[in-house]
Amino acid sequence: MAIQCDNYEKNSDFCNCSYPGCSRKGNCCLCIQYHLGMNQLPACCFPDSVERTYDRSFERFTKLYK
């Protein structure tokens, strides 16, 4: 992990990212920055069943929560 997060352990308890070896798991600041840069939302914005598809697009989010 590039930057140590003071809340890493607490964040890791609710982080539902299922991507193997994710270097940002539990580090919300880096995760949000990364996904917004990819025009996506982070895993925590989706239910587990959708998160596992790795489709974290804004389009998928709006279809879920219309």
Image (tube, rainbow, N blue to C red):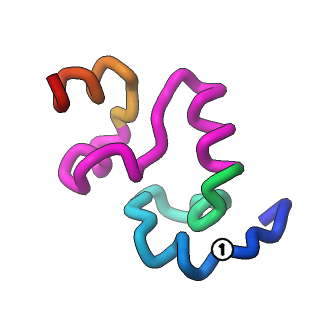
Q: Which residue is rendered at x = 84% and y = 60% of the image?
A: 2
Q: Which residue is rendered at x = 60% and y = 42% of the image?
A: 32
Instruction: Tell me residue 49's x, y (percent).
Output: 19, 51
Crowding around mark 1 (Cα neighbors within 10 Å: few <14, some 14 to 19, many 20+) is few
Instruction: Tell me residue 9's x, y (percent).
Output: 59, 81
Most distant residue in the top direction: 59
> Which quadrant of the rendered structure holds the C terminus?
top left
Q: Amino acid at mark 1?
A: Asn
Element type at mark 1? loop
Q: In the displayed structure, would residue 13 be above or below residue 16?
A: below
Left or right: 29 in relation to 18: right
Instruction: Tell me residue 33's x, y (percent).
Output: 68, 38
Which residue is identified by label 1? 7
Q: In the displayed structure, would residue 48 be above or below residue 34?
A: below
| Quarter assignment of residue 21 | bottom right
Is residue 38 inside the magenta stretch? Answer: yes
| Quarter assignment of residue 18 | bottom left
Left or right: 8 in relation to 54: right
Left or right: 19 in relation to 53: right
Q: Nearer the viewer, residue 15 or 51?
A: 15
Left or right: 12 in relation to 32: left
Most distant residue in the bottom direction: 9
Segment tinted magenta in the rendering: 30-54
Question: In the rendered picture of this protein, how many numbered marks are placed on residues?
Answer: 1
Magenta highlight: main SS: helix
Q: Nearer the viewer, residue 50 or 63?
A: 63
